[in-house]
Image: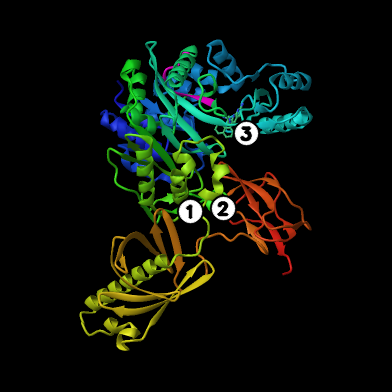
Amino acid sequence: MFDSVLIANRGEIACRVIKTARRLGLRTVAVYSDADAKARHVAMADAAHRIGPPAARESYLRSDVIIAAAKAAGAKAIHPGYGFLSENAEFAEACAKAAITFIGPPPAAIRAMGLKGAAKALMEKAKVPVVPGYHGDDQGLATLQKEAARIGYPVLIKAVAGGGGKGMRRVDSEAEFERALTGAKREAASAFGDDKVLIEKYLVKPRHIEIQVFADSHGNAVHLFERDCSIQRRHQKVIEEAPAPGMPEAMRKAMGEAAVAAAKAIGYVGAGTVEFIADVSDGLRQDRFYFMEMNTRLQVEHPVTEMITGQDLVEWQIRVAAGEKLPLQQDEIRIDGHAVEVRLYAENPARNFLPSTGTLVRFRAPPEGPHLRLDTGVREGDEVTPYYDPMIAKLIVHDRDRRAALRRMRQALHETEIVGPANNVAFLAQVVGHAAFVDGDLDTGFIDRHKADLIPKAAEVAPDTLALAAVALLLQRADQAATARRASGDPHSPWGLADGWRMNGAYEERLELMAGETLHTIGVLPEGAGWRLNIRGASLFAAGTLDDGTLVAMLDGQQRRVGVVRQGDRIIVLERGHGTALGLHDPLDVGEVEEGVGGAITAPLPGKVIQVLVAAGEKVEKGKPLLVLEAMKMEHTIAAAGAGTVDTVHVAAGDQVAEGAALIALKEAEA
Ligand code: MV4
């Protein structure tokens, strides 16, 4: 076994790998870009090397710089994590050339799975079921159209070099075929530099079920059962679980065997994931699963497999890379209970999941234990930057069965506190508690189908929330007054009498809180150890204690525990994963970017203009898509917040824009 490892990655996965490497007694070396000099993964490692500026292309994707860092640090192995260089065959080769062990599969196995058409052909040969379709070399319109008719509509056109849904077009009839093909080829050429496509039968109700496989360099290969990753949004996984709900034992066995056959067919070594698509229009059926692709790396969602099998997959990767045999044989690997993972993202569900950045003013999750795991690369006070994936953390729970695990997850999300960037905690809690999800009725269309139930609406602030904010503010003020009295050394200092209502007994103070555009007035009268509050015509008695940002309040005899964050003129109350921001004096809703009617629409994030959908002089309705911006690896449609006329278009497709750059000027429609 090598004695040291460099982790060619950042964030939660770098931290995750360091943890196991250290447990195995290895020296750990981190790398970092300028944006990550103070990041958690750097602090955790035994040594850390700077590899360049923030942009991934100039740092985490610089194989030459990373290999030089490994040499300089004396690291004998490199773990690539996921993303970045993890599926880069040239990088794996460059490591070998530098006499460094690449902790991943052989370059030939990475290449074999890189091209979809070739991978499909390989799998067919290995008797792994593939979606009925055409993946031949003849790319002429006549041939493709004839093949589509043979397969039967609806069909799906996919880019051979593709992934993540790019260059994919559903076609429902022959009349639409040529147009769809032209579009798919154009998208494929621009995204992958290769316009080859394949055609498949379109599966109407698909589930994404993948099998974790592992192979060693002695010819052994096993699987560690399945993960269900059907809850996705725009090809981004949101929730993953193991085992797959409702999976029949015979189907599990068939899928496991197919995945092992796939790994063996390409001489696989290390951790891999074989992705299948299951057609669940008639439920889960043993004859309705098909190979989609193989990921030749450790996956983001690997913890759910670790939780149900009790194994450490990073340890397996390290042992296999060091030439050891697999730690277990197939019949020694068993499923224990159920595990669920959610990805906490800095994004705003109410604004079409627009990624968000900024300081994590508050980031707290329930304590880790045998039932709960938190994988993260950030700490409270750290920054979510626009340079990398906006995932804040993964929360993973394990319990005896799915229902118990889901209950636990919901509770954990309710106890999670994030303030700073917009985030999806409340959204995840809604998904995890949704009746259809609890029933196991999942497919890849779940989020779209149920979005009205899942996306938190801008509801009127509840009186209790106002009361909690008021109690927190009153406690903070009392505390400040006490501190000031102590500091002055004069118990009779006027600070102690700062509150007018104390002098005048029955005088009711008015506390004004802004929720968005709405002003809420709360009447406050001291009473006993607390206050009598008057909120919207109702009266209640409130008291409490505030310690380290946690408020324990009594509202008319009922105890409530919530997180409270004070940010200048705002107070944020955190209840069950949902934050309510209330402004103290200023009616400005700080922190939110205004959607533009009237005046300039600006870029909410730095990015690239993909498409401009309107022209100057055009009249637009509320909600009309104006422009598509690619930022943080995702496409965002910016829509008109109200009716108006396009005055000026400041940008064109292909433009790189800075955060805050003017994109389009709108003239508001006359009222
Ligand atoms: C499909 C499909 C339906 N029929 N193939 C999307 C990304 C790519 N890896 C495969 N994808 C799909 N392939 C056929 N023949 C539907 C999808 C699909 C999907 C698959 C897995 C998880 C989420 C998805 C979301 C939309 C579409």
The secondary structure type at the circle numbered 1 is loop
Which badge, 3 or 1, comes first in the chain's sequence?
A: 3
Q: Amino acid at mark 2?
A: Arg
Residue at mark 3:
166
Q: Nearer the viewer, residue 303 or 205?
A: 205
The percent position of residue 350, horizontal first and vertical second, equals 54, 53
> Relative to residue 612, is residue 634 drawn left or right?
left
The percent position of residue 524, horizontal first and vertical second, equals 37, 78
> Relative to residue 503, is residue 138 drawn left or right?
right
> Does the residue at mark 3 contact the one at mark 1 (Cβ under 8 Å)?
no
> Relative to residue 185, is residue 60 drawn left or right?
left
Magenta stretch: give its range. Answer: 267-277
Q: Is residue 646 visible?
A: yes
The secondary structure type at the circle numbered 2 is helix
Q: Amino acid at mark 3?
A: Lys
Residue at mark 1:
422
Which badge, 2 or 3, comes first in the chain's sequence?
A: 3
Compute the Cα span from label 3 to label 1: 27 Å
**Residue 300 on the magenta span:** no
Which badge, 2 or 1, comes first in the chain's sequence?
A: 2
Q: Nearer the viewer, residue 440 or 644?
A: 440
Residue at mark 2:
351
**Can you tell which mark lies on residue 361?**
none
Which quadrant does the N terminus fall into? Answer: top left
Find ligand 1 in the image and state its quadrant.
top right
Q: Amino acid at mark 1?
A: Ala
